[in-house]
Image (cartoon, rainbow, N blue to C red):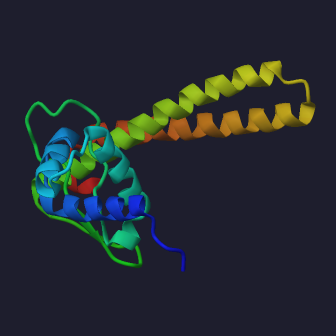
Amino acid sequence: MPERSEEQGRIDYLIDQMFDVLPCATRAEIAEKLSRRTRTTVTEGTVGVLLTILRSNAEAYGWTVPHVKRSTNNEGDKRFFAALVEPEGEMYLDETPEARAFMKDGAKSTISHATTSLRNEQMALLICVGLTRSRNRKALLQEWAEDMAYMARKGRRLLEALQDDETVADVA
């Protein structure tokens, strides 16, 4: 078994400590609480990296932080919270109406972000199609662009359905 690096040990330590400082309203609040708790400097950027690592390895850590709505949190809601993850991938989280609303907002934000990205990247690929000489590559690029456009259309339909139905239980 390979030896864990000092950096990986620090990451694991900060992720473990993050569990104890949640829930929080913002990444900045997480950074501030982690800095106080660990008596080290933890930046908002570091928190972003920790969240990415945690979400990518949720089963190994046994918990995660669900994605939250991408926007300014003027209300100060504690949108960042822990959700326990079983080895099989099943998630357990707070069943309060607030937590369910944050999950729904996070899902809508993630779908919106992915839909916009797919549409933008699809347009970029279509430009590449026009600049590509090889018929095979052109066909592959065209097919991939069409798949991206299809997924973007599905994302827009899903967002419309979520906007129409404001019940919290339908997404989370």
Left or right of 24 in this view: 116? right
Q: Give the quadrant of the N terminus.
A: bottom right
Q: Residue at x 84, y 31 (%)?
A: 138
Instruction: Pick the residue in front: 134 or 154.
Output: 134
How many numbered circles are shown?
Answer: 0
Left or right of 105 in this view: 129? right
The location of residue 100, given as percent across then percent down, is: 19, 55
Instruction: Pick the residue in front: 79 or 112.
Output: 79
- Is residue 9 visible in the rendered structure shown here? yes
Q: Give the quadrant of the C terminus.
A: bottom left
Instruction: Pick the residue in front: 29 or 148.
Output: 29
Q: Residue at x 38, y 42 (%)?
A: 110
Left or right of 113 in this view: 97? left
Quarter holding residue 18: bottom left
Q: Residue at x 12, y 56 (%)?
A: 37
Quarter holding residue 151: top right
